[in-house]
Image: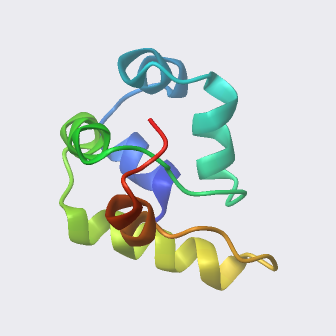
Amino acid sequence: MDMKQLRLRSKKRAEEVAAELGVAISTVRNWEQHKNVPRMTPKGLQKLMEIYNCTFEELIQAEAELEADSKTQVPSVENTLTAGGAR
């Protein structure tokens, strides 16, 4: 399940997710188009999991699908979490 599928499962529009997280709509769309992964603090990741009603493992799986589809290396959710995040 990728990021878009997680959002659709939660019955949220991309605009709603962006507003709830305090990020630009383009950020959410970039996650869904496999251009990058969420880069945020542990609290931000927790909020994302609440919005998507998913587990950390499901976010990691979405990232794995992103990396499998991506031709460029993107920073991982786990690495972002251990590095303290950007938001």
Pick out the residue farthest to the right.
71
Q: Quadrant of the N terminus?
A: bottom left
Residue positioned 34% across, 63% down in the render:
59
Front residue of this view, candidates 1 and 21: 21
From the top left corner, tell me how far across and down residue 45 is, in percent: 29, 46
Left or right for 63, reference 30: left
Measured along the vertical axis of the image, is residue 38 above or below residue 50?
Answer: below
From the top left corner, tell me how far across and down residue 40 is, in percent: 42, 44
Measured along the vertical axis of the image, is residue 9 above or below residue 78?
Answer: above
From the top left corner, tell me how far across and down residue 46 is, in percent: 20, 44
Residue positioned 42% across, 64% down in the render:
77
Total number of numbered labels?
A: 0
Measured along the vertical axis of the image, is residue 64 above or below residue 32?
Answer: below
Residue positioned 28% across, 42% down in the render:
52
Front residue of this view, candidates 10 and 24: 24
Pick out the residue farthest to the front.
83
From the top left corner, tell me how far across and down residue 69 is, in percent: 69, 78
Name the quadrant containing residue 53. top left
Front residue of this view, candidates 54 and 60: 60
Left or right for 56, reference 84: left
Name the quadrant containing residue 35. bottom right
Q: Is residue 3 visible?
A: yes
Name the quadrant containing residue 16. top left
Q: Quadrant of the C terminus?
A: top left
Q: Is residue 1 visible?
A: no
The colour scheme used to paint the residues is rainbow
Residue positioned 60% across, 50% down in the render:
32
